[in-house]
Image: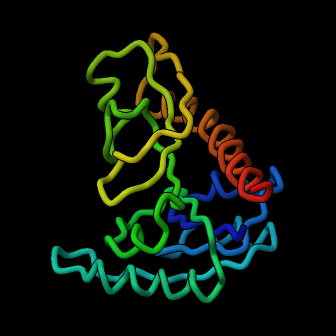
Amino acid sequence: MRLAVLASGSGTLLDAMATAGLPVDLVLVDRHCGVEDVAARHGLDCEVLERTDFTPSFDRDGFTDRVLDRLSIAGIDLIAMAGWGTILGAAAFEAYPGRIVNTHPSLLPAFPGWNAVRAALEHGVKVTGCTVHVATEEVDAGPILAQEAVPVLDGDDEATLHERIKAVERRLYTETIRAILERERVA
């Protein structure tokens, strides 16, 4: 099973995956970012499919087609989103049904969306965490594959809480992807 990682940020999730020995066949980024350096350090094939339009008229379906073309050329079977900043169009979920996974910094279905850690703090929860889930066209709404709780400590702010969640997320996401790859290899 061939694995692609779609990422847009600093690359900490990709670094955790590569360090743990996950067989990453392709890394795609939608903007120049730290992920490129992480991929290079691990000797991973990394390509930029740059998104240049951030207006309401953004051609999401056209961009999704570009991503799908590259994934198809690489023979990708499983996609792990790792801070990927662009929401993909319906064609991605039709082409890879149940084979796009994502991670989210809350215990879904609580606090979906971009500002989950801030929302958890604003609501005064005592426990939050991270979720690994199947990505679907509806953001943060797919089937849950794994979750782990992270306590909210007195004095936590968004940055400190998010860092503790990310530490759990890097391990849990890597373990979950490994389990998927091993299950598919045995099947």
Quadrant for the C terminus in the image: bottom right
| Residue sitting at x 49%, y 69% | 96
| Residue 43 picture quarter | bottom right
- 42 or 155: which is nearer to us? 42
In the drawing, does residue 45 fall left or right of residue 173? right
In the drawing, does residue 45 fall left or right of residue 54? right
| Residue 23 picture quarter | bottom right
Quadrant for the N terminus in the image: bottom right
| Residue sitting at x 23%, y 79% | 58
Q: Which colour scheme is used?
A: rainbow
Residue 70, x across and y down, in percent: 55, 86
| Residue sitting at x 72%, y 79% | 45
Determine whether 44 is above or below 15 in the image: below
Determine whether 78 is above or below 148 in the image: below
Outermost residue toward the left in this view? 56
| Residue sitting at x 64%, y 52% | 12
